[in-house]
Amino acid sequence: MKAVVERALAAADSDLTMLIEGETGVGKEVLARAIHERSGRPRARFVVVNCAGLAPTLVESELFGHLPGAFTGAVRRRAGRFETSAGGTLFIDEVDDIPPVIQGKLLRFLQDRTFEPVGGDQPQTSDARVLCATKRSLPELVREGRFREDLYYRIGAASVVVPPLRERRDDVVPLAEHFVGEWCGSRGRPRAELGDAILERLLRHDWPGNVRELRHALEHALAFSAGGALRPEHLPSGLGESEPRPLLELHLEARTSVPLQEVLADCERRLIRWALAIASGNQVRAAELLRLSRTTLRNKMSALGLTATRGAGTGEE
C-alpha cells in the first residue's frame, strides 16, 4: 500500500487524468481524495459522480448537465459535474459502467476540455482535473467491445491498482485501530480496546467487502459493546468463524531437499520486518507483536543483519 500511495501522490500535483483500479470497497475514493488534497487545487471542490446503475440519459445529464426541455421532466437548466467541479477535481467512480454512447463525449472532454449540455449545441469549457475508478478490467471490456479503446488509453496511461484487503492482511490491525479511534473520538467515548480474540477473528476473515466491510464490522461491534472492550460476539454473525488459515504455506512439490536453517532464517527475517513495519520501527512494540523480549528481538536482528529506524521500518546491514 505504501508503494500504491507513493505512486498515486507522485502525480498528484498535475493535471494528469488518473485511473484507480480495485475491487468495490478497497478505498478508491479515499485515495482519490488524497490525490486531490495533494494537488494544486486542495481548496477547490472535490466532486464525485458514481455511474453505476444510472440510465444513459442520467449519466449524460450528471456529467454534462442539461437545458430546459432537453428531455421529459427537464424543466430547468441543470449544471453538470464538469461545470460544478471547474477549478477542482472530478472523481468519476465506476467509469466502467458509462454507456458506450457517452464514452465518446467523455473522451472529447479529456482531449480538448469542452462539452455540450444535453439539449444544447454551444460548447462549454471546464478546467476540472479528472480522476476515474473502475472495479472491472478495462482491457477486458475493450476486448468485449464494451469500452472504447481510445478512451482506455486516455485514462489508463497513469493508473494505480489498490489490492484487496485479503492480499494485505498486515493492514487489517492498523485499519481496525484507526476506525475504532475515529468512531469513539467522534462520539466523545473512551477508546475501546481491541483484544487478541477479536483481532484473531478480524485476521481470519477474507473481507470480500474489503475496507468498507471492515469499517462496518467494527461499527457494528462498537454499537453492541455498550462502551466496553470489544469481543468476538460483538462482530456481525459468522464473521471470522471459519478455520484459521495457516501462517505459513510451503511449496515443496519440485524439491528434493530443503536447507532448513536458510528457510527458518528467511521466515524470521520476514516476520521481524512485518512487526517493525507495523510498529514504525519501534522495537519495543515489534517485540510485543512477536511475543518476544526486546533483548531476544535485538539479538535476532543482529544475527540476521537487520536494522530499524523509528518511523522507517527496517533496513539491512
Image: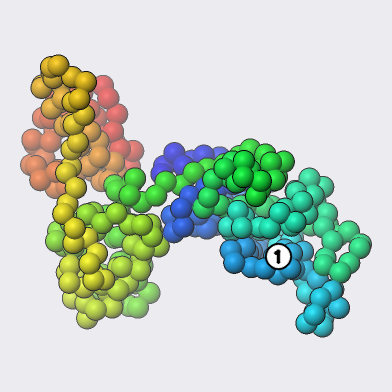
Above or below, comparing residue 291 to residue 197 in the picture: above
Which image quadrant for residue 270? top left
Residue 274 visible (yes or no): yes
- Secondary structure beneath dot 1 equals helix
Residue 11: x %, y % from top left: 60, 41
Residue 202: x %, y % from top left: 24, 58
Look at the image and tell me in which quarter the N terminus lies: top left
Above or below, comparing residue 7 to residue 69 in the picture: above
Q: Residue at x 10, y 30 (%)?
A: 299
Residue 275: x %, y % from top left: 22, 42
Q: Residue at x 38, y 60 (%)?
A: 209
Identify which amino acid the numbered label 1 is placed on: Pro
Q: Residue at x 46, y 47 (%)?
A: 162
Which colour scheme appears in the figure?
A: rainbow
In the displayed structure image, the side of residue 151 where residue 42 appears, left or right: left
Q: Which residue is mark 1?
A: 56
- Choose between 155 and 29: the one closer to the eye: 155
In the displayed structure image, the side of residue 202 where residue 87 appears, left or right: right
- Looking at this rendering, what residue extends furthest in the right direction? 122
Q: Residue at x 28, y 78 (%)?
A: 223
- Choose between 249 and 31: the one closer to the eye: 249
Above or below, comparing residue 16 to residue 214 in the picture: above
Badge 1 crowding class, 10 Å Cα cut-off, few under 14, some 14 to 19, many 20 or more, is some
Which image quadrant for residue 99? bottom right
In the displayed structure image, the side of residue 122 where residue 29 appears, left or right: left
Residue 247: x %, y % from top left: 18, 42
Residue 12 visible (yes or no): no
